[in-house]
């Protein structure tokens, strides 16, 4: 099952998504009757890096013994199908197509066995990065640095195929089976440190070949069972 968050003439609604049709408590809406929003409103993005073998080898990183994480603020949220503003303070903006979990209930100290009980589902994050900025927070945390969507899907997060295309050219291809720290392990690890709120996002790192973006580029990040997160850069 997939869930979407949409803006309609009746306001912002949530409902079941089926091939473009969204069924809510207020009624059924077709694609021409709504604007697709980010599927949740997180209080924070908890993002893991250095989590794919080929990426670690490509970037000459050390393999982390535990999840290597950082945090993006709520202002990082950016809707699918909406142009991404190219930040004025960088000339090296990059994309990274990541699987992300959406928390469904307030929780802390969650065991791996109980993770499925607190996760609403999975979506896609484009972890935008300004490579020419000093230190990770300056690179990763800024307005619209977290395009998210298109929907939240109830899927098994391990063994999911993914691709990223830029202007129709495939740039990333991998499978979540190749993560060092799998999603349930990562969520449990982070829950020892943070109290998660409903709508919070936890992403699990990018496969190899994150790359530079130019104004006018179209980004399409596809995860099997979820769909395609699509944005252009303006």
Image (tube, rainbow, N blue to C red):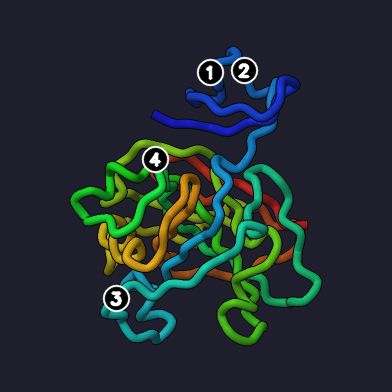
Q: Earlier in the sequence, mark 1 or mark 2?
A: 1
Q: Is residue 85 above or below residue 67?
A: above
Is residue 48 visible in this depiction of the protein?
A: yes
Look at 48% across and 52% down and name the residue there.
Answer: 200
| The furthest residue to the top | 27
Secondary element type, mark 2? strand
The residue labelled by disc 1 is: 23
Sequence-first tag of 4 and 3: 3
Disc nearer the start of the sequence (1/3): 1
Q: Which mark is residue 120?
A: 4
Q: Quadrant of the image for the C terminus?
A: bottom right
Percent coordinates x, y for residue 153 in the rendering: 41, 37
Q: For mark 2, does the 10 Å Cα neighbourhood hold few (<14), some (14 to 19), or many (20 or more) residues?
A: some
Mark before the other along the chain sequence, 3 or 2: 2
- Is residue 113 shown left or right of residue 182? left
Q: Do the residues bearing badges 2 and 4 touch, measured as CB atoms within 8 Å?
A: no
Across and down, in percent, residue 24 comes to: 55, 19
Find disc 2 in the rendering and name its residue: 29
Residue at the disc numbered 3: 66
Secondary element type, mark 3: loop
User: Could you tell me which secondary element the residue under label 4 belongs to?
Assistant: strand
Q: Taking the image as drawn, is residue 177 in sight?
A: no
User: Where residue 49 sits: x, y (%)?
Assistant: 42, 72
Cα distance, mark 3 to mark 2? 44 Å
- Label 4 to label 3: alpha-carbon separation: 24 Å
Residue sitting at x 66%, y 66%: 213
The CA distance from mark 2 to mark 4 is: 22 Å
Mark 1 and mark 2 in contact? Answer it, CB < 8 Å.
yes
Q: Which corner quadrant of the image does residue 8 belong to?
A: top right
């Amino acid at each position: 099952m997939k869930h979407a968050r949409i803006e309609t003439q009746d306001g912002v609604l949530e409902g079941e998504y089926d091939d473009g049709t969204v069924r809510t408590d207020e009624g059924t809406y077709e694609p021409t009757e709504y604007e697709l929003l980010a599927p949740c409103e997180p209080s924070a993005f908890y993002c893991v890096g250095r989590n794919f073998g080929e990426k670690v080898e490509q970037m000459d990183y050390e393999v982390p013994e535990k999840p290597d994480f950082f945090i993006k603020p709520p202002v990082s949220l950016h809707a699918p199908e909406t142009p991404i503003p190219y930040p004025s303070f960088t000339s090296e903006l990059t994309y990274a197509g990541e699987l992300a979990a959406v928390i469904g209930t307030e929780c802390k100290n969650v065991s791996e066995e109980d993770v499925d009980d607190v996760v609403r589902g999975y979506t896609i994050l484009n972890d935008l990065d300004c490579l020419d900025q000093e230190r990770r927070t300056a690179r990763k945390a800024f307005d619209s640095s977290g395009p998210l969507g298109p929907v939240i899907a109830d899927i098994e997060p391990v063994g999911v195929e993914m691709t990223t295309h830029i202007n129709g050219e495939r740039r990333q291809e991998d499978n979540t089976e190749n993560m060092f720290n799998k999603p349930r392990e990562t969520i449990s690890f982070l829950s020892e440190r943070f109290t998660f709120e409903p709508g919070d996002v936890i992403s699990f790192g990018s496969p190899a070949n994150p790359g530079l973006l130019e104004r006018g580029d179209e980004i399409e990040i596809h995860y099997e069972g979820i769909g395609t997160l699509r944005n252009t850069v303006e």
